[in-house]
Every structure is written in structure tokens, then in C-alpha cells.
Image: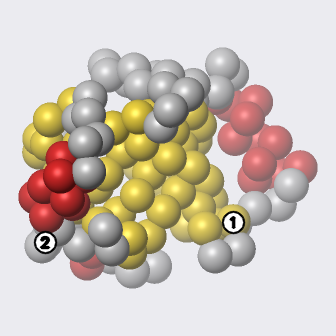
Amino acid sequence: MEILSSRILVRPRDWELSRTFYAETLGLAVAREFPGGVVFFLGTGYLELSKAGAVAIGDDALWLQVRSLPDAVAELRGRGVTITREPVREPWGLDECWIADPDGRAIVLVEIPPGHPIRTDLR
């Protein structure tokens, strides 16, 4: 499975306190912001702080961008991986599918469709 990008997703108990800590105390630069969240640069990776949403996936997760979600899902199914949430186009415009690691930690596989702001706004 080809991974194009990744990030760690954190759903903190106190979002504002955590945002202040990462932005001001640690001085992490903001990669992008969106309603309900912020993504910080972590060297060659990213840290996303997200407010709890309609779909809870636990306290933290690994976010993996793949080139082709259908291909990744087929490959993983072929390896016997259980899909915990089938692929779907989310309201925020990303195609997502969830699996879990052996400890039950969510792994979110994401394909960014053409025309999505993440693909077109490269700030």
C-alpha cells in the first residue's frame, strides 16, 4: 500500500488548552485550519487537533493518505484486514475508510479527491 502523507489525530479533552499548548508553548507552525480543528507541522509529519465530532473514533488515530482508496482497501482485505468502517465520502469532502491496529487504535485511510481544497490550496 502506497502512503502519500500521514498525520496523528488527537481529540483532546480541552481543545482550546491543547491548541494553545501546541501553538504557543511548543511554538508549532500551523499547516492549516478548518472548522473544528487545526493541523500543525511536525517536521516531516503533521499533528491534527480535532474537536469531538458526530463520529467518534477514540482518543487518537493514525491518518494515512493513500493514492487510491479502492486499491488500498482491496489490498488490505486480501491480507485479511477487517474494515471497521467502509469507504465513504465524508461531509468534509474526503474519501475515508477505517481499520484498526491490534490494540484497537483507529487507522483512517484517506483519499483526497480531485478539486478538494487540501489538494488545491498548498499553503
User: Would you say residue 2 is visible in this rendering?
Assistant: yes
Which amino acid does the dot numbered 1 rest on? Answer: Leu
Kindly indicate the quadrant of the structure image that contains residue 67.
bottom left
Q: Is residue 120 above or below residue 34?
A: below
Quadrant location of the C terminus?
A: bottom left
Q: Which residue is mark 1?
A: 42
Kindly indicate the quadrant of the structure image that contains residue 35.
top left
Q: Secondary structure at mark 1?
A: strand
Of residues 120 and 8, which is closer to you in this image?
8
Quadrant location of the N terminus?
A: bottom left
Name the residue at the right extreme.
25
Residue 74's spot in the image, x, y percent? 13, 55
Q: Secondary structure at mark 2?
A: loop
- Residue at image position (50%, 32%) is 102
User: Would you say residue 51 is visible in this rendering?
Assistant: no
Q: Is residue 109 above or below residue 50?
A: below
Residue 17's spot in the image, x, y percent? 76, 30
Q: Is residue 90 above or below residue 113?
A: above
The disc at residue 61 is none
* Label 1 vs 2, first from the N-terminus: 1
Nearer to us: label 1 or label 2: 1
Q: Is residue 8 above or below residue 101?
A: below
Which amino acid does the dot numbered 2 rest on? Answer: Gly
Residue 95's spot in the image, x, y percent? 17, 51
Residue 71's spot in the image, x, y percent? 13, 64
Q: Which residue is mark 2?
A: 115
Q: Is disc 1 surrounded by few (<14), some (14 to 19) or many (20+) residues within 10 Å? A: some
